[in-house]
Amino acid sequence: MMHPNTVMAPINQDKGLGVVATKFIPKGTIVYTIDPFDVKIPLDSPLLKDTRYREIITRYGYITGPEGYIIGWDHSKYVNHSCSPNTISTGWGFEIAIRDIQPGEEIVDEYGLFNIESDLACACGAPGCRGIVSKLDHIALTPVWNVWVKDALSKFFLVDQPMLIYLESDAIDEIKTFVQTQKGYKSVSTNLLPLTLGKATSSSSGISAEM
Ligand SMILES: [Zn+2]
């Protein structure tokens, strides 16, 4: 579910639709979180072998941890990638604003944490654009991403959090502990599958043959 102060909007010819902020969203704000209405498609789902549906799933869905593909029921599925994102996945299943987001600014995210099955050409236009977004980007970038998240979490309890009600109390307690003690941080790599991390796995997911 996307933050209430966001809407779907046409961005440009290359990107098509995206999501923009309708009001100022400060750094540290939860901008998206998984919720019970999202469509969940396990990696061994027959739908992923059906060409009619596979393109839709991979275009609008993202893969996180053990849940398989998640397709947001709302406009969250239109959030585009940027190599200089203003939001990023945390280890707690939500996306956090890593800098202040101005009204009218596009909400952009880091697809390098989404276990993408094949490389994506990127034309995000950000300074330092990687050109290709790859499932291997995390190898070099996870330390950078964790610095961004930790920095944003320092504002977590200082900003308006309309989406805090959708977080489990355990997650809020863990974040509180981290902010107060710098202990118990959950790395962004929590979102990565063993296959993306390059570890052997005994599970036979439908994705394995293609990764
Ligand atoms: Zn880029």
Image: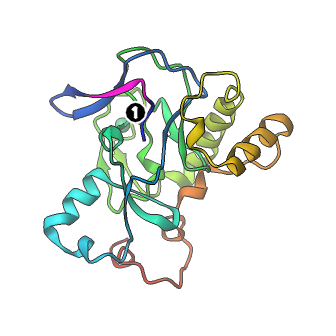
In this view, 153 is above or below 25: below
- What residue is pinned by disc 1? 108
Q: Residue at x 43, y 15 (%)?
A: 23
- Residue stretch rendered in magenta on the structure: 4-8
- 40 lies above or below 109: below
Rate crowding at label 1 as few (under 14), some (14 to 19) or many (20 or more) other CA atoms within 10 Å: many
Q: Is 7 covered by the magenta stretch?
A: yes
* Membership of 73 in magenta stretch: no
Q: Look at the picture and state if 55 lies above or below 150.
A: below
x, y percentage for residue 173?
Answer: 76, 45
What residue is drawn where x is 64% and y is 21%?
159
User: How far across and down, in percent of the image, does residue 78 sit?
Assistant: 29, 40
Dominant secondary structure of the residues highlighted in magenta in the image: strand
Q: Nearer the viewer, residue 192 or 138?
A: 192
Provide residue 110's location: percent of width, then percent of height: 45, 42
- Residue type, label 1: Val
Q: Tell me the quarter of the picture where residue 79 sits.
A: top left
* Residue at 64% in and 42% down: 146
- In this rendering, position of residue 139 left or right of residue 151: left
Res 143 → quadrant: top right
Mark 1 element type: strand
Q: Residue at x 47, y 65 (%)?
A: 67
